[in-house]
Image (cartoon, helix red, strand yellow):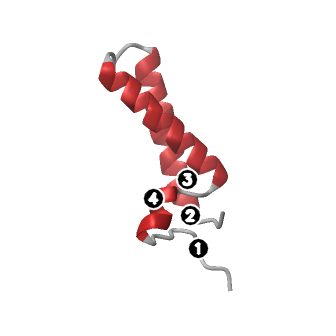
Amino acid sequence: MKKNMGRLDRIIRLIVAIVVGMLFYFGAIEGTFAYIAIALALVFLLTSFINFCPLYAVFGINSCSVKK
């Protein structure tokens, strides 16, 4: 897998995942929406750690900076 996520993109995904996790933990979100949000947060965590987003690959998006 070739990296296709830049640093800012990974940081934003981590922050969103942490916020969703905290909202779930403190009971601010619940029900079906909460489980869908947690699933997306887990995907965000995984993709931010491996620096690869499958949807970016499908659409040809690359936010990773080019090294010269």
Contact between marks 2 and 3 (CB within 8 A): the answer is: yes
Question: How many marks are shown on the rendered structure?
Answer: 4
Residue occupied by mark 4: 55
Crowd band around label 1 with a 10 angstrom C-alpha radius: few (<14), some (14–19), many (20+): few
Residue occupied by mark 2: 6
The quadrant of the rendering that contains the C terminus is bottom right
Residue occupied by mark 3: 10
State the residue in front, 65 or 49: 49
Q: Disc 4 and disc 2: Cα gap in Å? A: 14 Å
Q: Earlier in the sequence, mark 1 or mark 4?
A: 4
Q: Nearer the viewer, mark 1 or mark 4?
A: 4
Classify 49 as above or below 41: below
Residue furthest toward the bottom? 68
Classify 12 as above or below 28: below
Q: Disc 3 and disc 4: Cα gap in Å? A: 14 Å
Q: Disc 2 and disc 1: Cα gap in Å? A: 6 Å
**Image location of residue 13, percent across then percent down:** 49, 47
Residue occupied by mark 1: 65
Q: Disc 1 and disc 3: Cα gap in Å? A: 12 Å
Q: Residue at x 53, y 56 (%)?
A: 53
Q: Nearer the viewer, mark 3 or mark 4?
A: 4
Q: Earlier in the sequence, mark 1 or mark 3?
A: 3
Q: Residue at x 45, y 29 (%)?
A: 38
Disc on res. 26: none
Contact between marks 2 and 1 (CB within 8 A): the answer is: yes
Q: Which residue type does callout 4 highlight?
A: Leu
Label 2 sits on a secondary structure element that is loop
State the residue in front, 41 or 9: 41
Q: Which residue type does callout 1 highlight?
A: Ser
Label 3 sits on a secondary structure element that is helix
Q: Which residue type does callout 3 highlight?
A: Arg
Contact between marks 1 and 3 (CB within 8 A): the answer is: no
